[in-house]
Image (tube, rainbow, N blue to C red):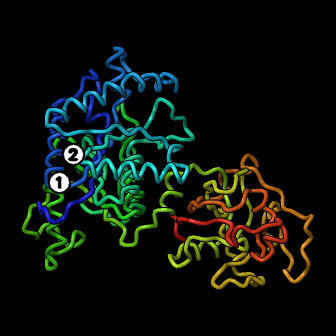
């Protein structure tokens, strides 16, 4: 491996790779191989973070229980029992090679506040600069659905995004992404290179669930790959049975980068001088999203939704939009949310309604390239039609907030997420209006944009 190119590498190890599915005994041979791999990577100048599942599995063994409890409190209790033993196991194994480690337990709530998020990033960077290997796990003892990452695949992707890592390795019980379950379908083929996660979902079966101890499966790995590659992190699925393959995988990809004459991954990878180790690589975005947008999109739990028109959807999909939404592009709001909270960006499912709104004459919005809202009779009565802005605005008039329980899920489609600059009631008052009216209607104007740091995940 080329020592002149030290990398930041995040390695995620699932529960099925840490404890035996039936006996719940630690898989010491696998864990020892991972430890040796991490230490050797460190010796070659790389910075390594390990994301480790397994607290509940270790807790099951300690309490001699046959299976995971169904209740949330039962799972949290087992996580509390198992986490200490799990980190002690890692410390013992790493200690044999005199490699210091640190335990980092996170929930989405821990990094939902921007200051705490930056503190977490600084802690990671300080630990890595000290030569320590951070071992990250979700703090299952206190996590509830609103603040859970959902799966450690997602946690590893968010961690790699926080660190601007070069590689995220998702080590699992198969050596890559297949067109179908290779254990059941002998005709399943491995997919070597993925340039678009959205496109690949149509070509593969992701119905395979994780083990009885784990919570993931291939779908959670696709979600993780989408988050990580969007932040500029090359993501790789490979086998946990051969963690030492990380060396040859990195060397293989370094050879592709260092030899301009070598065909790229997407063309004919088999013609390179180096043999290709079994794995699936998700190619990192050439234009990764900014840290603030990544934080908003993936670490904040959305509190409500902002309905936009199709024109706004098209504009926000362009990188030059800056991910900022003016009030004129807002149709309405769903639910109650506060200023600073994350919100879903949604469009009406009825494409004809959206398109007709986008085709109507533009209102007197002075910002360039900004979609506008005009009255249309086909809209639901919950969306208040607006007369031309030349008439005076009645400050006593405001549009009602349409709460999420009044909406059917079929009414809207989530296309992205962002961070609200105004609360739901305020946004309902200024929706569809020129930004110059915000101060007049609300009595103040912190920003001419109602939502910022928007990441559009579903293109027009």
Instruction: Let me know if residue 352 appears in the view.
Output: no
Residue indicated by mark 2: 239
Nearest to the observer: residue 55 or residue 129: 129
Percent position of residue 192, x then y: 24, 60
Tell me if 215 is positioned left or right of 443 in this view: left
Tell me if 392 is positioned left or right of 272 in this view: right
Give the alpha-carbon distance from disc 2 to disc 1, as whole Å.
8 Å
Tell me if 194 is positioned left or right of 226 in this view: left
**Above or below: residue 362 compared with residue 129:** below
Decide which of tag 2 and tag 1 comes sooner along the chain: 2
Residue drawn at (33%, 66%) of the image: 195
Q: Secondary structure at mark 1?
A: loop
Residue drawn at (57%, 60%) of the image: 417
Tell me if 198 is positioned left or right of 372 in this view: left
Nearest to the observer: residue 130 or residue 39: 130
The tag on residue 278 is 1
The tag on residue 364 is none
Q: Secondary structure at mark 2?
A: strand
Instruction: Let me know if residue 245 appears in the view.
Output: yes
Q: Quadrant of the N terminus?
A: bottom left
Question: Within the image, what quadrant is residue 4 found in?
Answer: bottom left
């Amino acid at each position: 491996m080329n020592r002149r190119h030290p990398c930041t590498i995040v390695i995620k190890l699932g529960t099925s790779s840490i404890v035996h599915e039936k006996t719940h005994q630690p898989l010491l041979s696998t864990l020892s191989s991972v430890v040796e791999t991490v230490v050797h990577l460190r010796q070659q100048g790389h910075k390594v973070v390990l994301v480790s599942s397994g607290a509940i599995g270790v807790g099951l063994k300690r309490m001699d229980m046959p299976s995971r409890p169904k209740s949330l409190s039962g799972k949290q209790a087992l996580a509390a029992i198992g986490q200490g033993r799990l980190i002690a196991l890692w410390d013992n194994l790493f200690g044999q090679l005199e490699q210091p480690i640190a335990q980092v337990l996170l929930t989405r709530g821990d990094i939902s506040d921007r200051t705490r998020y930056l503190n977490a990033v600084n802690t990671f960077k300080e630990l890595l600069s000290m030569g320590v290997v951070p071992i990250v796990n979700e703090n299952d003892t206190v996590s509830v659905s609103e603040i859970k990452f959902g799966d450690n695949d997602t946690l590893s992707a968010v961690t790699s995004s926080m660190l601007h890592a070069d590689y995220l390795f998702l080590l699992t019980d198969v050596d890559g992404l297949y067109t179908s379950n290779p254990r059941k379908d002998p005709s399943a083929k491995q997919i070597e290179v993925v340039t678009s996660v959205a496109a690949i979902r149509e070509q593969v079966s992701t119905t395979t669930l994780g083990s009885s101890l784990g919570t993931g499966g291939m779908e959670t790995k696709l979600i993780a790959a989408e988050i990580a590659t969007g932040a500029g992190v090359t993501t790789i699925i490979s086998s946990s049975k051969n963690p030492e393959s990380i060396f040859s995988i990195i060397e293989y990809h370094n050879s592709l980068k260092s030899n301009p004459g070598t065909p790229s991954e997407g063309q004919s990878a088999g013609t390179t001088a180096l043999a290709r180790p079994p794995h699936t690589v998700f190619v990192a975005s050439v234009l990764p999203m900014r840290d603030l947008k990544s934080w908003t999109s993936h670490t904040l739990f959305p509190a409500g939704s902002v309905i936009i028109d199709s024109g706004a959807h098209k504009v926000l999909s362009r990188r030059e939009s800056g991910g900022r939404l003016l009030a004129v592009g807002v149709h309405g709001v769903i639910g109650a949310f506060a200023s600073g909270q994350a919100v879903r960006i949604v469009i009406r499912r009825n494409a004809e309604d959206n398109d007709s709104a986008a085709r109507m004459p533009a209102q007197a919005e002075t910002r360039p390239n900004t979609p506008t809202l005009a009255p249309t009779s086909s809209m639901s009565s919950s969306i208040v039609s607006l007369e031309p802005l030349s008439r005076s605005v009645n400050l006593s008039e405001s549009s009602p907030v349409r709460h999420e329980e009044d909406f059917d899920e079929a009414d809207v489609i989530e296309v992205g997420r962002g961070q609200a600059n105004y609360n739901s009631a305020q946004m309902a008052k200024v929706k569809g209006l020129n930004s110059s009216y915000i101060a007049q209607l609300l009595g103040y104007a912190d920003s001419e944009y109602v939502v910022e740091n928007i990441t559009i995940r579903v293109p027009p």
